[in-house]
Amino acid sequence: MANLGFVGLGVMGSRMVKRLLDAGHTVTGYNRTPSKAQQLLDAGMRWGDTPRAVAEAADVTLSMVTNTAALKAVTEGPDGLLAGLGSGKIYVDMSTVSPAASRDLAARVSAKGAYMLDAPVSGSVITLEEGKLSIMVGGDAAAFEKIKPILQNIGPKVTHVGGNGLAVSMKIATNLSLAVQMLAFSEGVLLAEKSGIQREIAVEVLLNSVIASPMVKYRGPFVLNMPDEAWFNVNMMQKDMNLALEMGHELDVPLPTAAVTNELLTAARGMGLAEQDFAILFEVLARMSGVSQ
Amino acid sequence: MANLGFVGLGVMGSRMVKRLLDAGHTVTGYNRTPSKAQQLLDAGMRWGDTPRAVAEAADVTLSMVTNTAALKAVTEGPDGLLAGLGSGKIYVDMSTVSPAASRDLAARVSAKGAYMLDAPVSGSVITLEEGKLSIMVGGDAAAFEKIKPILQNIGPKVTHVGGNGLAVSMKIATNLSLAVQMLAFSEGVLLAEKSGIQREIAVEVLLNSVIASPMVKYRGPFVLNMPDEAWFNVNMMQKDMNLALEMGHELDVPLPTAAVTNELLTAARGMGLAEQDFAILFEVLARMSGVSQ
Amino acid sequence: MANLGFVGLGVMGSRMVKRLLDAGHTVTGYNRTPSKAQQLLDAGMRWGDTPRAVAEAADVTLSMVTNTAALKAVTEGPDGLLAGLGSGKIYVDMSTVSPAASRDLAARVSAKGAYMLDAPVSGSVITLEEGKLSIMVGGDAAAFEKIKPILQNIGPKVTHVGGNGLAVSMKIATNLSLAVQMLAFSEGVLLAEKSGIQREIAVEVLLNSVIASPMVKYRGPFVLNMPDEAWFNVNMMQKDMNLALEMGHELDVPLPTAAVTNELLTAARGMGLAEQDFAILFEVLARMSGVSQ
Amino acid sequence: MANLGFVGLGVMGSRMVKRLLDAGHTVTGYNRTPSKAQQLLDAGMRWGDTPRAVAEAADVTLSMVTNTAALKAVTEGPDGLLAGLGSGKIYVDMSTVSPAASRDLAARVSAKGAYMLDAPVSGSVITLEEGKLSIMVGGDAAAFEKIKPILQNIGPKVTHVGGNGLAVSMKIATNLSLAVQMLAFSEGVLLAEKSGIQREIAVEVLLNSVIASPMVKYRGPFVLNMPDEAWFNVNMMQKDMNLALEMGHELDVPLPTAAVTNELLTAARGMGLAEQDFAILFEVLARMSGVSQ
């Protein structure tokens, strides 16, 4: 069993640590807000006072934070994760940040004789809890082989996609389909409903059809009852779509469905629905169709 | 066990009859080209000389033909299915035809004291063989209850969506997502590939992600190797998209992703790819991206 | 000066006849509702009791009716225009009907030894009154040369585009830009307005820029004050867009801007704005942007 | 007559100076490459050794440079334009830069007791030479009134759109229609051509129709013969489109036609046509339609 560190014990991070502890690993954890860590400490996690302390204590340190700014906050400075890394250590960042930011950080890790891998995940809390999380990994192949069994304790599907930053690119390429599939699904539901089929039945049929991806299965029922709290809100979804479209413009890949869907996300914001789960695309289309809720 | 009839023993129909025979039903079958029926006759199917003879011999007659014109050919005239229907009999058409044509036929069946149900399927030959076919049914609720167990021998998910013609409407509302999901998937693959990820790896990651609907799982690998024979070609897919868009215009439902995707199907035709499986949308986008195959 | 006939004295037709009378031609006119013709009779127009009577009295008969059905009503039957045509006569239909319907009628005219030309116009009542109407003509080249000077009395730009039906095709190809330009203009106005520029000023600047087509100049001010009566309403505009998209699918021409714009016209209908001038696309987009009127 | 300065004597700037000299103004000019100025010096322009010298010599200094970076190069540093500005002087930047960069510079000008106005132009060299250039101005209203007559010597339409940076915003809002109108025009030409109308005739008809904006009139003939040198190439057009789409996402304005058109500009890049005038959108669509050139 490995000697691990983990920085960022939020909704996703804490559940990952739980799975790593259950698998028998030693885990030293750090979170900006220590109170959130109590349950994990009760389950056997050790406490690190700073990201640096975590990295010093562990052979392999993982992190899972919100965005590029949060990643900087835990990696830089005298107490930062970078300061604790040394020759032969491995650092795995599971956050979704920009490919460029990830590559920059990897270069600094490399300068310290350590290895960095970017390992963003595809799926939500539920996918994680069901043990179905898919993890993409970018970076050195030998380092990947070492940490692969550890990541498999978090999710069964672990795929090495290429060099540093490419896993983040792969994730963005994946995520554009989330919003597009949700909007196409909504088009189908409204078409059925206006034909005279009850919305509940239309949803049931679609969820049992060949278009029912895990994402559609999770979010499809939201067109009947929107969740109180967004899993992934319009603003977050649009940030990923904008990243995809920027990549498309740089790499000369036209993204027609992503581009059109992104404008409907903008409409969601214009209609005051920015904080809702992006399944609210259904509501945007319903208003355009004159369907009152 | 029921006394059934089946008209149309093509790729889908013949496999359905096989399942019905395996379930213990008596089946009288008819096909325009009798030679195709030999294997089923060997398996115990009885032969009906005309669609009318099939309907006369059976309590419940099913049909599965290519399109509205083929449906007319087997239902009308002195040897047609309609002529063999009488009071209390049930007729289930599983073809995908226009909602209006289905409703017209239902009215004529009703005039003979019989019941008609439209029961198009969602899924392909593979879904059928895996026993995962989803069947939507439109028409009288009591008649539906009677034939539900029979349809469950064909596919496990049988859903009554409403009155006559509505199952066909539901199918069209479902199918628009096929092309949209395929195009969004292609956008993701090309984005990943031009970022520096091997196409094989990009496909593998996407097929293990939350966007992997059964349709994406079937067709995703086609971007690596297009099949020799189309499962559902560009022309067929575009016919369904045009039906969806016509419904959208009549019912005032904007279909932004369907509309944009349909224009790429048109581009596929313009590029001479009309007879290819609609997964060729990937190739259309690749050409627009300057990616040579 | 020529001996002319004119069938259909509506908003456009009556103004055309006025211009032909002013140019010194003899005109025999017919309208389903005779009362509308009084002003033209006062101005010297002769009355024909039926379309047939008009065609019999004239060497060149023109017609301008609403749609394909109205064209059938005035051309067919014992009192119809066709019955009055004979060897050497010329018939010019200026209505916008389907290319196929126009070609069919031309064949029947030809069978009588006469010539038919389709000559739809680009522009509205205002363009006509300003003497700036552009007229496209399809049909026999020699017949075109004969009637060209007559059409130039209606509008200065008369262009022979090819054989029968092609002028109608050309008109549909022209009209798709109407809705697209209006929507792009609306996008610009709302972008300026939300940046902090007064809507009136944004409109003024755009109307003086290189994007100000005659259509934009006519309709641009409508985003400040919608007209009481539609010049060309959403339903009419969408009919032309649907014709264009059907042609695109038949001829394998992708129409990305037309397809997307058409879905916003559908949204206008969904929002209950079908009878408004299609400049209401601005309002549709404003609602999607959360801009209250 | 006024005592003017002008920094940036490129294709547009030199022609502007010529008009100002013709109007009787005194002009001190500066260009990074002095050789380009000879013709203007022969026409009476005075030479300033640095941007600073120009600003010191003049009451009103104008600039016209390529982009934000070039603007920094001529305004900053000991020899920069800013160093030459003092109380009561006016600085008018006619370049197209980002609204934020323009507002930042305006604040620094204001700190020196001077006034800055952003005054980008709508139109090309030809519009300028024809004396039809439209100029939008952002900034202080009183300063605007002072320089309005000077700008009218460059182009007849001078409009104050609001505070600093808003004229640049207005220009971006205008420019999105350039690409959209060009693509819609191309859709119409190809639809006509595949219907059987000669391309030359389709273009002629469209250029005489209500959709013929000045932009369409300039660029329409390019679908018959692309120019040897781009007036405004795909890369430049896409930069403006990206700016528009960014503004749309920030300000919650959906831009459906701009978004779709931008993906076709991306396709132009993918097809290796990035350096062509953006009228090459026609060629992109032609390839998608299977039309060989």
Image (cartoon, coloured by chain):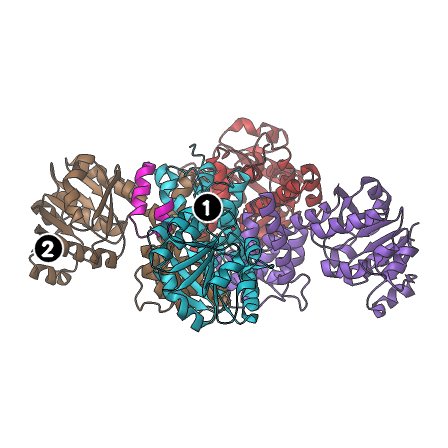
Chain colours: A purple, B red, C brown, D cyan
Q: Marks 2/1: CA distance?
A: 58 Å
Q: Is residue A214 visible?
A: yes
The amino acid on which the numbered mark 1 sits, given as a three-letter code, is Lys
- Residue denoted by label 2: C22
Residue D252, by quadrant, is bottom right
Range of residues picked out in magenta: D196-219
Q: Is residue D123 visible?
A: no
At mark 1, the secondary structure is helix
Q: Is residue B62 above or below residue D255?
A: above
On residue C155, the disc is: none
Other residues around mark 2 within 10 Å, as few (<14) / some (14–19) / many (≥20): few
Taking depth in this image into account, of C285 and B33 the one nearest to the observer is: C285
Q: Is residue A183 above or below residue A287?
A: above
| x and y, in percent, of residue A223 in the image | 60, 62
Quadrant for the C terminus of chain A in the image: bottom right
- Residue denoted by label 1: D36
| x and y, in percent, of residue A43 in the image | 91, 62
